[in-house]
Amino acid sequence: MNPEARVYDNIFQMLPSVENPSPMVRINRLNPSPDFVLYAKLEWYNPFGSVKDRAAWFMLRDLEERGEIGGERGLVEPTSGNTGISLAALARARGYRMRAVVPNRVPVEKKVLLKIAGAELEVVSDELCPVPGAGGEGAINLAKTYAKAQRNRYAMPNQYENEMNVQAHYRTTGPEIWRQTEGRITHLFVSLGTCGTVTGTSRFLRSKKPDLKVIAVQPSEGHDVPGLRNVKQLEVSRLFDRSLIDEILEIDYELAYVRALELFQNEGLRAGPSSGLIFEGARRIIERDRVGLGVMIFPDDVFKYTSNMMKHLPFLCEGLTA
């Protein structure tokens, strides 16, 4: 392995770490204050295209170390897409099978990518992000049923409760940001999903800088931003630690798509809608605080959401046929 030359022996060596961090890029044209330095940490540069590579790898290795996977026993996991894609790709590369239980409203691009990555796909009627569901019909409860009733076939990492989801960011994302900003970070901007990213990253950075401001964004109710949750939906996650967050901003979810488009067209960043929502939150805080150094964690890129972009920005559909 030679990270400086970007030569690796296998895909696992490409996973992010302090020695091999995901890149950060400065926001220029869209930054509302010249005295506030704003960076986007581009998690789509991870091998399987999202921030979830980190948690998936930590959870998979933990299962291996505890002897809970291998032979005929593979994985089952409820997912809105990214964690499932990461888990499926990593598991198949290690020789394990993977079953993904996915809500129907997840973008078709993600469903196809799950199958391409090697997952056995089960699509259920559920909210955009998995919820426990009544009578075991939700994605989470269905996955738990498989893991319990077919223990010889399935182990369930359970990203919503697994401490390895937090540890992945405490041991990689946080240290990477601290090193990349040389400890000068004053603001961290994140979204809310399983909450492994915000909890692990904030916990590490706060240990280094107790006065760090952590700003989380949540989409408005009834949203259509895959992978994100607002606070009212967070009962599903045991990883949410409100004490680590200074402010939670609720933002009209339609702005997620508008800002994603603007980031691509003005900064050259192919940001997905969750990144667009995070940027809108950062923009509002910068207009208020004016001075600082902020880092936004951009979870993934727009390529998995082209159908959603067309739905919410219908002018994109113009001129697509002769």
Image (cartoon, rainbow, N blue to C red):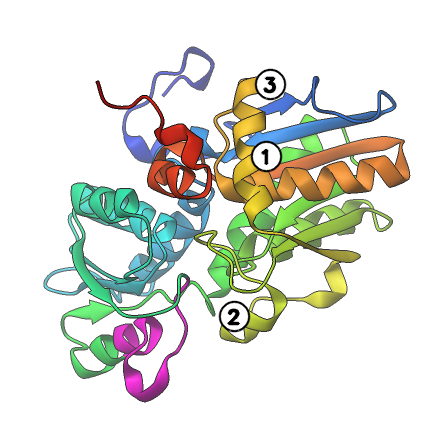
Q: Nearer the viewer, residue 34 or 187?
A: 34
Q: Is residue 167 above or below residue 304?
A: below
Q: Amino acid at mark 2?
A: Ser
Q: Is residue 143 above or below residue 206?
A: below
- Asked if labels 2 and 3 touch by Cβ distance under 8 angstroms, the answer is no
The residue beneath circle 2 is 237
Q: Nearer the viewer, residue 2 or 132?
A: 132
> Tag count in the figure?
3
The residue beneath circle 1 is 259
**Quadrant in the picture for the N terminus:** top left
Residue 165, visible in the rendered structure: yes
Residue 292's image quarter?
A: top right
User: Which residues are the magenta region?
Assistant: 129-144
Instruction: State the CA–CA distance, disc 3 to disc 1.
Output: 10 Å
Q: Is residue 227 magenta?
A: no
**Quadrant in the picture for the C terminus:** top left
Seen as rendered, the residue at the extreme top is: 5
Front disc: 2 or 1: 1
The spot of residue 309 in percent (x, y) is 42, 38
Please rate how many residues cluster around mark 3, counting C-alpha atoms within 10 Å: few if below 14, some from 14 to 19, many from 20.
Answer: few
Q: Amino acid at mark 3?
A: Asn
Residue 14, visible in the rendered structure: no
Q: Is residue 133 magenta?
A: yes
Instruction: State the CA–CA distance, disc 2 to disc 1.
Output: 27 Å
Task: Label 2, secondary structure: give it.
Answer: loop
The answer to whether residue 69 is left or right of residue 25 is left
Q: Which mark is residue 266?
A: 3
Task: Label 1, secondary structure: give it.
Answer: helix
Please rate how many residues cluster around mark 2, counting C-alpha atoms within 10 Å: few if below 14, some from 14 to 19, many from 20.
Answer: some
Residue at 46% x, 37% y is 313
- Asked if labels 1 and 3 touch by Cβ distance under 8 angstroms, the answer is no
Residue 46's image quarter?
A: top left
